[in-house]
Amino acid sequence: MHLARRSQKGPPERVARKGRAGSGSRRRGVPLLGAVDSCPHACLIVGLGNPGRNYSGTRHNSGRQAADRVLDMAEVLARGKWPNGRITLAASSGSRFLVLVPETFMNLSGRAVAPVLERYGLDPEQMVVLHDDIDLPLGEVRTKQGGGTGGHRGLNSLADTLGDKGFWRVRIGVGRPPAGIDPADYVLDRFEAAEKETAESAIEQAAQKALAAITGTDDGA
């Protein structure tokens, strides 16, 4: 997967494009952990999900789990948090990057992401979003840039808040709900015992793809 920066810019009042990360200051509650400008491609990984013990391990939290898995694979340099999220500065293969796990609910994800992009002077195109996808079979993982949101509430929130759909996505297939089951209820439920091994493998693969996007080592889709 090649991550080329695009020239299109979103609304300046929502995401500032200039400014570099330094050390020892905060703005709008977002911790400033250090510079990320050594990354050749994407600079920010976002794992979508819902906070709290009640949602841990649910299908809708697959992106959140994958982001945590990225941190297991990388070198953690610094950690910080504020009411809308927890953020980590990490490094892998010579690239310094950020991993954000929003502490907002899924449909308010944009509230956590937009201030981070602004604080670190990043474009939406420099962001890789990890998320669950009911339109993919369980265990399938795909990457794409831009396009529609498929009704995913987290992606809708990002697109609406940023005014830009050009961010990268790593889609983690959780499968369609059985007949008669509401999709909203389905994604907020946990994986069945028979699904867990396949789901965990997909989350691992998604984390690897996100990390490869940061380091520029993935040429696949």
Image (cartoon, helix red, strand yellow):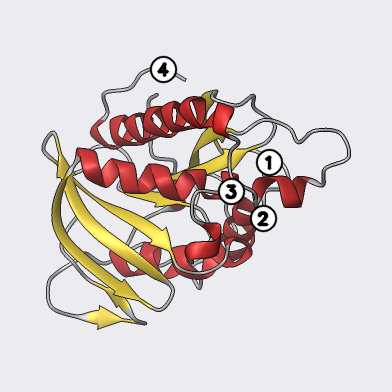
Report if the CB atoms under discs 2 and 3 are less than 8 Å apart.
no
Give the residue type that dot 1 points to: Gly
Q: Which one is nearer the viewer's eye here, 123 or 128?
A: 128
Residue 35 falls in image quadrant: bottom left
10 Å neighbourhood of mark 4: few (<14), some, or many (≥20)?
Answer: few
Q: Whole-percent x and y of residue 27? A: 31, 81
Do we see residue 86 in this rendering? yes
Q: Is residue 180 left or right of residue 86?
A: right
Q: Alpha carbon of mark 1 to alpha carbon of mark 2: how far?
A: 12 Å
Q: Alpha carbon of mark 2 to alpha carbon of mark 4: how far?
A: 27 Å
Q: Which residue is mark 4?
A: 220
Residue 4 falls in image quadrant: top left
Q: Which residue is mark 2?
A: 153
Report if the CB atoms under discs 2 and 4 are less than 8 Å apart.
no
Between discs 1 and 3, the one toward the N terminus: 3
Q: Which one is nearer the viewer's eye here, 89 or 40?
A: 89
Q: Which residue is mark 1?
A: 148
| In the depicted structure, whether residue 57 falls above or below residue 104 | above
Name, please, the residue furthest toward the front.
193
Between discs 2 and 4, the one toward the N terminus: 2
